[in-house]
Image (cartoon, rainbow, N blue to C red):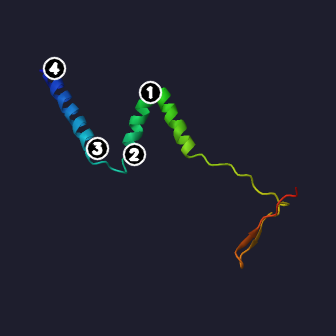
Amino acid sequence: MVILAVIVASVLLLGLIVWTGTKMVAHPDPDAVSVGGAMGAGLGVFDPGAARAREDIDDQKNQTEVVPSPDEGDDPVWKVDLRRGTVKIPRPPR
């Protein structure tokens, strides 16, 4: 009798998992990030190389380009005239 109860409970649990997965695929919820995060953590355990590669790709997407800040003595080289709509760029002597 106990074996029958375990089998019925297992079948019901499996049915619930299949129904939930089908519902998630058919009608994705944009706010359901936690499920993907939990599955991603599980995938990181079974395939750590792919998980590290995914993290590196995500880090590269969020990476910004480093631009040097101007010094106090740096004057703009271009002369911009907003009234005439012209820009004069001095050429270096040859």
Measure how far apart labels 3 and 1 are at the Cα level.
23 Å
Amino acid type at image mark 1: Val
The residue shown at (27%, 39%) is: 21
Amino acid type at image mark 4: Ile
Task: Name the front one of labels 1 and 4.
Answer: 1
Quarter in which the C terminus is drawn: bottom right
- 85 lies left or right of 93: left
Q: Residues within 10 Å of mark 4 (few under 14, many from 20)?
A: few
- 5 lies left or right of 40: left
Residue 24 x %, y %: 28, 44
Residue 18 x %, y %: 23, 35
Nearer-N-terminus badge (1/4): 4
Amino acid type at image mark 3: Met
The residue shown at (39%, 40%) is: 36
Q: Dot 3: what SS?
A: helix
On the question of residue 76 being in view, the answer is: no
Residue position marked by numbered label 1 in the rendering: 45
Measure how far apart labels 4 and 3 are at the Cα level.
31 Å
Q: Are marks 1 and 2 in contact (CB under 8 Å)?
A: no
Measure how far apart labels 2 and 3 are at the Cα level.
12 Å
Q: Dot 4: what SS?
A: helix
Measure how far apart labels 4 and 2 are at the Cα level.
37 Å
Nearer-N-terminus badge (4/2): 4
- Tell me the tag on residue 3: 4
Measure how far apart labels 1 and 4 are at the Cα level.
32 Å
Residue position marked by numbered label 2 in the rendering: 33
